[in-house]
Image (spheres, rainbow, N blue to C red):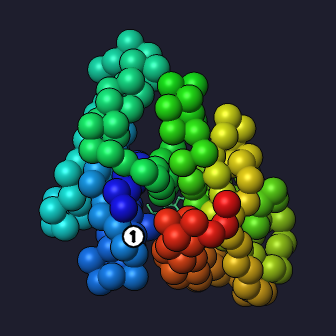
Amino acid sequence: HRLAVFASGNGSNFEAIAAACADGRLDARVVLLVCDRPGAYVCERAARLGVETFAFRPKDYVSKEAYEQDIVRMLDERGVELVCLAGYMRILSRVMLDAYGGRIVNIHPSLLPAFKGAHAIRDAFEYGVKVYGVTVHYVNDELDGGKIIAQRAFDYTGADVQELEAMVHAVEHPLYVEAIAGLLAGRNR
Ligand code: GRF
């Protein structure tokens, strides 16, 4: 199977997916990393792992639709079957959704539908949440709004947000890999 990963920052989920492809947990290959921040650490990870990267500056394009048209062309050319958003900090336009809708998934660091948005871990922590979790979901035109594919919850009653963040990421990596494996095998639909 041929995957694309979209990321904007650190890229630990990108690397977890690429590692699972390399060691056979996923019967797949990451054929393209799409990154909207050319200096992001995820681009270094991709270079180290030999994953082709399209890094672009949105400001170099007249519109979101314009750069997404370039992305769709690259996905089409490479025969991408599933697009995995992994810390991609942009909302997709109709261009991506019309071309790949139903084949785009995202990982979000909360138990959706609670705590949508870019600061989910901090928001949940400040709310005083005691049961945290991670969600893998389909992407539609609502922010963090698509149908849920997989979730995993864990208890945390400590007061250290950095410790909590590390726990969230440790849950994310295997959950995302397992959810992708299920999708590729035709489960979870
Ligand atoms: C993850 O917490 C993911 O749930 C959220 O963005 C973060 C990306 O982390 N959507 P990384 O770049 O994969 O390390």
Residue 6: where, in percent of width, then height? 41, 49
Q: Residues within 10 Å of mark 1 (few under 14, many from 20)?
A: many
Residue furthest to the top = 62
Q: Which residue is mark 1?
A: 17
State whether residue 6 is above or below residue 122: above
Above or below, comparing residue 47 to residue 140 in the picture: below
Spot occupied by residue 153 in the image (x, y as percentages of width and height): 74, 80
Camera-side residue of 123 and 78: 78
Task: State which quarter of the image contains the C terminus.
Answer: bottom right
Residue 54: name its quadrant.
Answer: top left
x and y, in percent, of residue 166 in the image? 53, 79
Residue placed most toward the observer, 39 or 46 = 46
Image check: 3 left or right of 187?
Answer: left
**Marker count (numbered):** 1
Q: Residue at image x 50%, y 25%?
A: 95
Q: What residue lies at 46% left-to-right and 20% top-to-bottom?
A: 65
Q: Quadrant of the N terminus?
A: bottom left
